[in-house]
Amino acid sequence: SLGCSLTHQQVKGLAERLLGTQQPLGKRWIHRFKQRNPSIITKRPKAMDSRRYKAHSADVIQAWFQRLDNIPVIQGIHPSNRWNMDETGIMEGRGSNGLVLGSAASRAIQKKQPGSRAWVSLIECISAAGSSLPPIVIYKGKSVQAQWFPSDLSPYDGWHFTYLDNGWTTD
């Protein structure tokens, strides 16, 4: 959703305030809450630039589209002819944000990452009418290599894979 996700502690605090109880909720309350609400799960948040985060709210987005729709030249363009393109980059070895198991005796756990820091760019395009173009994946390299892909490519039907010397677009 376009909001700010709550931590376990914040959800517990909110529930305690709503209940108006002086007794704190038990240690397993969050676990039981998630069992009662299977559509709610614990996730590791993904980092987002603070400027992008501030602009990432339903009110900001709706206000922008209302201003856009008030521009006469835009009103003359059919939504199926209005397109947005966005590019994002992924650094090899930085994509896994999952939880891991480790010894309770130590606070930190090491994660191996590749020595090379190859860059992959992804480009998506979507129209104001809701249609989209297949994604474009740009690898850093001199050619696209078979070992970069899983053996089953069916989930990526229609995607375009290419390469550039630096791995990202400059225009």
Image (cartoon, helix red, strand yellow):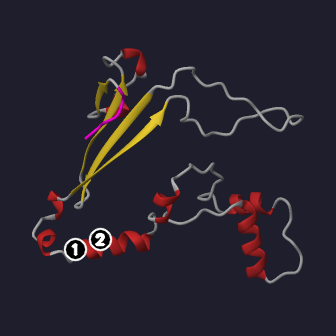
Residue indicated by mark 2: 65
61 to 104, vertically: above or below:
below
Where's residue 166, x and y in %?
Answer: 36, 27
Residue at x-position 35% and y-position 75%: 63
Q: Residues within 10 Å of mark 2 (few under 14, many from 20)?
A: few
Residue 106 shown in magenta? no
Residue 117 at x, y percent in the picture: 51, 26
Q: Residues within 10 Å of mark 1 (few under 14, many from 20)?
A: some
* Residue plotted at (73% across, 61% down): 8
Q: Secondary structure at mark 2?
A: helix
Q: Amino acid at mark 2?
A: Phe
Q: Quadrant of residue 124?
A: top left
Question: What is the magenta segment's predominant secondary structure?
Answer: loop
Residue 58 located left or right of residue 21: left
Query: Image point 42% across, 74% down: which residue?
Result: 59
Query: Does 152 appear above or below 51?
Result: above
User: Dot 1: what SS?
Assistant: helix
Give whichever of 136, 158 is nearer the camera: 136
Task: From the image, tell me which residue sits under label 1.
Answer: 69
Specify whether 148 is left or right of 75. Answer: right
Looking at the image, residue 123 sits to the left or right of residue 24; the answer is left
Whether the residues at callouts 1 and 2 have beta carbons within 8 Å, the answer is yes
Q: Position of residue 68 (x, y in %)?
A: 24, 71
The alpha-carbon separation of the residues under discs 1 and 2 comes to 6 Å
Residue 84, percent across and down?
26, 54
Magenta residue span: 166-171
Q: Is residue 169 magenta?
A: yes
18 shown above or below 134: below
Tell me which amino acid carries mark 1: Asp
Horizontal arrangement in the rendering, residue 12 relative to residue 159 (left or right):
right
